[in-house]
Image (spheres, grey):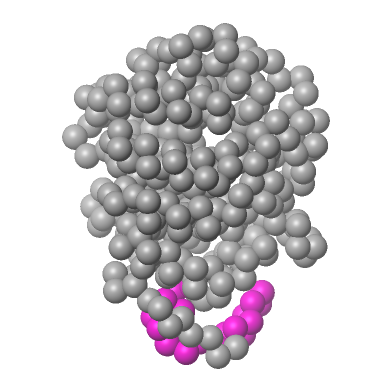
Amino acid sequence: MTRFGYTLMTEQSGPKELVDYAVSAERVGFDFEVSSDHYFPWLSSQGHAPYAWSVLGAVAHATERVELFTYVTCPTIRYHPAVVAQKAATLQILADGRFTLGLGSGENLNEHVVGEGWPAIQDRQDMLAEAVEIIRALHTGDLVDHRGEYFQVDSARIWDLPDEGVDLGIAVAGDRATEVFAPLGDHLIGVEPKAELVSDWNAVDGAPRIGKDGARAIGQIPICWDPDEQAARARAHDQFRWFGGGWPVNADLPTPAGFAGATQFVRPEDVADSIPCGPDLDAVVEAVSAYWEAGFTDIALVQIGDDGQERFLAEAAAPLLDKLRAAAPA
């Protein structure tokens, strides 16, 4: 069964609002909820960047059923992997086993703030692989000493561990990342509906196979629902025009000003060509279908803009979920 999620966009909403939206999203029937983990918004007009782990802790207590994910946390520069291992274990306990730690190699936008520079992509991937090794070791409950190429851990142990452990989802986008991370992760995270992401993951020796070994492929897609199509287009352009830059560009830009400059010539119609905008739920279903056709098992929706969340959740979310579940493969 295809599962559908709701995105807690920390770049566009404050912490209390995010908890309220999480509760409403569970109530209307979403299967899971994912949270971004940023220090900056992509664009200043989005206006927020609360600490995702505090928000998720509150959401874990305010909800009962939905699964929770980081989508995604970078455990290499802004956070040391030993700290990520500790807070993931704590959150899993608070969530009663509903949490999955989503990991990725990060964005300059968020990682530059601690003054450690921004490594090249191969170095970032090597750092992430070493970080996963540390997190896995600490989640055994053993005392861990580690001397690696990028990280040192001295006599560390996590004292509060969940009985069920913590699954790791790892974001991949290319051949090298898939080859490296498929054997290290429990689930695939992807930001594009590409069938080769799933097939390549399944082809790597030692990787848990999606759809066969309990591994999941988790994707994400932005939408901008609004009864007024022109209002939806304007909001999507104001808040989400950065989206068209693609991962290779977006990962390297350091500030919201950089994103503003890179997208200054993007028009509202350009954004609407790639993001469904307006009241047509069937158009949303058509856009989302690209993910399940590519073999993704889980798809999280991003409703763009804080000012559209309450109405989306109250009026559109439930009928949209009905349409999605009717169209998706069982």
Residue 319 image offset from top left, x and y in percent: 29, 21
Classify 162 as above or below 175. below
Q: Quadrant of residue 51?
A: bottom right
Residue 227 image offset from top left, x and y in percent: 46, 11
Classify 24 as above or below 79. above
Residue 108 image offset from top left, x and y in percent: 71, 51
Tell me the residue at 52%/58% (across/down). 53
Tell me the residue at 30%/37% (across/down). 27
Residue 189 image offset from top left, x and y in percent: 45, 48
Residue furthest left in the image: 330
Residue 258 seen: yes
Residue 75 falls within the magenta-colored stretch: no
* Viewer-nearest residue: 231 or 152: 231
Residue 217 is left or right of residue 118, and the answer is: left
Residue 299 is left or right of residue 174, and the answer is: left
Number of marks in the image?
0
Residue 216 seen: no
Q: Which residues are magenta?
A: 135-153
Tell me the residue at 37%/16% (across/down). 281
Q: Quadrant of the N terminus?
A: top left
Residue 136 falls within the magenta-colored stretch: yes
Q: Quadrant of residue 148?
A: bottom right
Classify 184 as above or below 280. below
* Viewer-nearest residue: 218 or 80: 80
Q: Quadrant of the C terminus?
A: top left
* Viewer-nearest residue: 20 or 208: 20
Classify 1 as above or below 136. above
